[in-house]
Image (cartoon, rainbow, N blue to C red):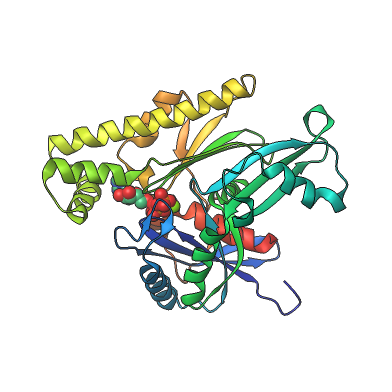
């Protein structure tokens, strides 16, 4: 960001069910949300995180950016899912100049793909970690996977200035808005994924990306009620808002909420067991799937931890020219990752 550089950053989150765009402006040390929008993607545009319908992503992003009158061309986006390997490793003390090679060599042990087809990146968490070793987060991803996201962004008229991992953007959104002292478990429940990152002292100390999300519930409703996917989705979302729905659907929703809560508990128990009893102090939920009726309460009861919706606008203002209190409340639940992506752009 030079003297004449852009003071705004654009985060583009390409999810299974929708694309979300957030544009943040930085003035001094404060940030404000300038634009935010969501464009639904046709079903089966993204399957197992792979873009299988390139043009659907391109059209949705181009259309949304046009609607929002986005002027910048550089965007930050993120990848997630089983194709992205995130692993915390301990490395013998290594001089800076040799770190890249040492990490590449180390990565071979953890990456189940041909190393020639993989992009490896890393972040040094601590130069003096446990056992006097360097503590590093290693990220590896298939090159073709990264390229397919970049190509969709390029064909929509943008350029990816930075490609991050969803989990870290959840962390960015959290750290900008919440006090870092108490360890927190951040959980994003999307259409096809459940991402958990436990943050303590400004670091991601545990993470997991599971293939569990709201889409499965829609598919269940579709099957039981003999509806199209779209009809089932509408029934799930509208009925919940109106507070009335067939008993069968209510039962399916309750079971889905219990399954999600059980998944979160399993992960947190695993984290606790592998970190000699360390625990998160509370849970913050985000993503469309977190709207599921009574989910915060079910998670709170199952995990025994206070649970709320992650609000990325505690310390980030929203430009009153474009947003009202109601519109902010309506987007806050799904804005954490796109806002975290835009924040990442300022530090990239
Ligand atoms: N009011 C609601 N009640 C229940 N579920 C809801 C509600 N609103 C949205 N959802 C669900 O949230 C999911 C979409 O959330 P989100 O936009 O965070 O997912 P995504 O980012 O597209 O997916 P992913 O991150 O898994 O790729 C859908 O499964 C949708 O049915
Ligand atoms: Mg998502």
How many marks can you see?
0
Instruction: Check the picture and name the quadrant holding the N terminus.
Output: bottom right
Compared with 155, 255 (above or below) is: above
Q: State the residue in front, 167 or 309.
A: 167
The residue shown at (49%, 48%) is 311
Tell me which residue sits at (63%, 58%) in the image: 344
| Residue situated in front as seen by the camera: 43 or 69 | 43
In-image side of 263 versus 179 (left or right):
left
Relative image position of residue 251 (x, y in whole percent): 20, 32
Q: Is residue 160 above or below residue 343?
A: below
User: Is 175 on the left or on the right of 100, as rendered?
Assistant: left
Residue at 14% over, 35% down = 248
User: Residue 257: percent from the left, percent from the top?
Assistant: 32, 34
Q: Is there any visible trace of residue 274 in the rendered image? A: yes
Tell me where residue 72 appears, x and y as whole percent: 56, 77
Which corner quadrant holds the C terminus? Answer: bottom right
**Can residue 315 be spotted in the picture?**
no
Q: Nearer the viewer, residue 55 or 199?
A: 55
Residue in the image at 13% along x and 50% along y: 227
The residue lying toward the viewer, choosing from 103 and 217, is 103
Q: Position of residue 154 (x, y in %)?
A: 52, 74
Q: Is residue 168 above or below residue 347?
A: above
């Amino acid at each position: 960001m030079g003297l004449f550089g852009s003071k705004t950053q654009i985060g583009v989150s390409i999810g299974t069910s929708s694309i979300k765009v957030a544009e943040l402006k930085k003035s001094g040390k404060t940030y404000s949300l300038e634009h935010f929008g969501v464009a639904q993607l046709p079903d089966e545009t993204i399957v197992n995180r792979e873009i299988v319908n390139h043009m659907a992503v391109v059209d949705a992003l181009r259309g949304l950016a046009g609607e929002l009158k986005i002027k910048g061309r550089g965007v930050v986006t993120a990848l997630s899912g089983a194709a992205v390997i995130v692993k915390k490793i301990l490395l013998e003390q290594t001089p800076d100049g040799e770190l890249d090679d040492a990490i590449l060599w180390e990565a071979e042990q953890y990456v189940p793909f041909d190393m020639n087809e993989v992009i490896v990146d890393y972040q040094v968490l601590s130069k003096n970690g446990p056992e006097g070793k360097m503590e590093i987060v290693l990220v590896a991803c298939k090159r073709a996977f990264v390229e397919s996201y970049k190509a969709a962004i390029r064909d929509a008229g943008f350029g990816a200035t930075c490609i991050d991992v969803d989990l870290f953007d959840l962390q960015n959104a959290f750290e900008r808005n919440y006090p870092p002292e108490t360890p927190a478990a951040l959980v994003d429940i999307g259409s096809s994924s459940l991402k958990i990152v436990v943050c303590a002292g400004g670091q991601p100390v545990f993470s997991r990306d599971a293939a569990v999300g709201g889409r499965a519930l829609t598919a269940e409703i579709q099957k039981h009620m003999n509806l199209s996917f779209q009809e089932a989705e509408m029934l799930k979302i509208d009925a919940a808002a109106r507070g009335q729905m067939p008993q069968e659907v209510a039962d399916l929703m309750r079971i889905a909420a219990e399954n999600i809560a059980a998944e979160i508990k399993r992960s947190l128990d695993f984290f606790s067991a592998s970190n000699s009893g360390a625990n998160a102090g509370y849970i913050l939920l985000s993503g469309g799937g977190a709207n599921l009726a009574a989910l915060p309460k079910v998670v709170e009861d199952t995990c025994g931890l206070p649970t709320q919706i992650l609000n990325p606008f505690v310390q980030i203002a929203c430009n009153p020219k474009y947003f009202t209190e109601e519109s902010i409340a309506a987007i806050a639940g799904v804005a954490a990752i796109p806002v975290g992506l835009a924040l990442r752009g300022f530090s990239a």
